[in-house]
Image (cartoon, coloured by chain):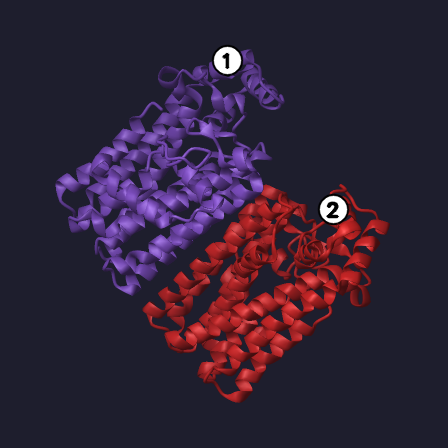
Chain colours: A purple, B red
Amino acid sequence: MMQRFGDPLERELRNAVGGDRLLLYDMVRYHMGWVDERGMESRSDPGKRLRPLLCLLACEAVSGDFRQALCAAAALELVHNFTLVHDDVMDGDRERRHRPTVWAIWGKSQAINAGDLLYSRGIESMAALAASGLAAEQALTAVRRLEQTCVEVIEGQFLDLEFEGRSDVGVDEYLVMIGKKSAALIACSLEIGALAGGAGPQAQRAFSAAGREMGLAFQIRDDMLGIWGDASVTGKPVGADVRRKKKTLPAIRAFELAGGEDLRGLRAIYSTPRPSGAQVATVLEIMKSLGVWEDVGRLAAEHAAAAAAALDALPVPEERRRAILGVLEFFVRRDA
Amino acid sequence: MMQRFGDPLERELRNAVGGDRLLLYDMVRYHMGWVDERGMESRSDPGKRLRPLLCLLACEAVSGDFRQALCAAAALELVHNFTLVHDDVMDGDRERRHRPTVWAIWGKSQAINAGDLLYSRGIESMAALAASGLAAEQALTAVRRLEQTCVEVIEGQFLDLEFEGRSDVGVDEYLVMIGKKSAALIACSLEIGALAGGAGPQAQRAFSAAGREMGLAFQIRDDMLGIWGDASVTGKPVGADVRRKKKTLPAIRAFELAGGEDLRGLRAIYSTPRPSGAQVATVLEIMKSLGVWEDVGRLAAEHAAAAAAALDALPVPEERRRAILGVLEFFVRRDA
């Protein structure tokens, strides 16, 4: 699928970033996976391009032609990458997609600038919908929806950081947070794709609702991969998020389900500065005995089913619907 | 002037930020000068509100009614404050407007989020021009102009940080930097005010050109105040920017004009980790003997004159023009 969209999308993304020679732009091009640290052309993992893919599929589902949504798809990917660059600064993460992060190379201050630039270029690219044949009213609606979504994403990132300092975060609160931080932009991607393809407000809302459920399913799956996922595929140790003491959904559920000695054990390990390999193994043992994998997997499956049902209700050709369902299934079943 | 605009503008700004109870919003309200650190209503210095003032005056000059530009004026102020919150993080500045900066209270990570939120709300407020009677095409043009300006401002901030690591920055390069970092948003404020008031593209460009000259004059004056300005008014020691070794225009000119012993003295002091009071006094002495104050003041006056000439050429009623000229004169003559 991405083969068909890939080249036009990458061209659109490069155009949107622009050809300026300032190092600031090389930082952005590096993060996007187009150049190396010295600004030389090189191919590296650009990430999944999930949001533009969904946007283009939604546009194609309602109009038959994905090209009308290319600048919107680029906008969504740029905005997503703006949040990644800033998140890496905030979380102090030194590596992303097997390379040093922007701040790890150029420092936190310039990484803030690089993120801000990605955000600006993202909004510009969305506003360019008006130049690709859409009425100005519609382009403006798309810009406003994107901005409202950005506000949700920023609120989600705020909550995520705030949760780190708390030990009493429940599942409901956590789902609100990932609904904002992750699912909102997935929902926006399908919604704006539909808008760019000429769908009316009701269909746009239906795409958005399906996207929100998809986004929740994806993020819950991501949380599972953060603990159990990488071992077989990448060779990384299992328990990565336990080692970092990240309170993602499996940890939250483990704390809720555990009692007695298990609970005391979890508390002790999650309050150690750096859990040892043996302690990580203990947490994994406790999670296994509590059935956390199955428990969290059930929640992911529920949201995936809700997304599939929402897609089913859309008045679009069957093969177009199946293309979007394919993305859902691929990402909910993936192992890395 | 600000009395007439003040209340409607503050109302518009508060509406644009929104009433959410999340701490993230209190951080923004704190920065804007509306609440204290605990989120309680309190009045503190909100800053000069220069950009919205110019936007409203430009709108009034072409249409007679400033209210059409209120949400645009709010947008410009929010975007300006987004850059301030991020700049404080990057520069490590702990104080602004006589209060601790957002990051000094809530940490750098959450300050990045607060800045991002201000940016989002700013763009939303600009897009709202369409709801205040302007055609969608025009509102979209305003959004795009604002985004292009944000890109300039971010480039300017990037260059400013880059210059810190260099000792060979010349006046021309420096003017390019402040043209982006400071003057671009002033130009945009007048331009979008005119657009919101219904002026055509030619008049918009003329307002923009006048704004760019004004912005350069303001920033050069700011640089002068950073060294000589505050003493008589605020009681702060003169030489603040010398103490911080900031290479603003007076320092750049001093290095260019100095020779022999003066130049060796400047080099020695600007490479000390923390210049002493005596060393600051020496720099001020050298600047005095070289006539740096007069030299830099001449440049500010040139740009102010160019701005006045550009305003003179605008086809707007004489009293409206004089109102904008009044702002120019006030800020170019100010002592603090």
- Residue at 49% over, 81% down: B60
Residue A310, label in figure: none
The location of residue A190, given as percent across then percent down, is: 29, 46
Whole-number angstrom distance, CA of label 2 to CA of label 1: 59 Å
| B199 or B269, nearer to the observer | B269
Outermost residue, bottom side: B318
The location of residue B253, given as percent across then percent down, is: 68, 58
The amino acid at mark 1 is Ala
Outermost residue, top side: A278
Q: Chain of mark 2?
A: B
Up/down of B285 relative to A117, above or below: below
What residue does disc 1 label?
A281
Image quarter hosting the N terminus of chain B: bottom right
The crowd level at tag 1 (other Cα within 10 Å; few <14, some 14-19, many 20+) is some
**Can residue B1 be seen in this snapshot?**
no
- Residue at 51% over, 17% down: A283
Residue B267, label in figure: 2
The amino acid at mark 2 is Arg
Q: Quadrant of residue B44?
A: bottom right
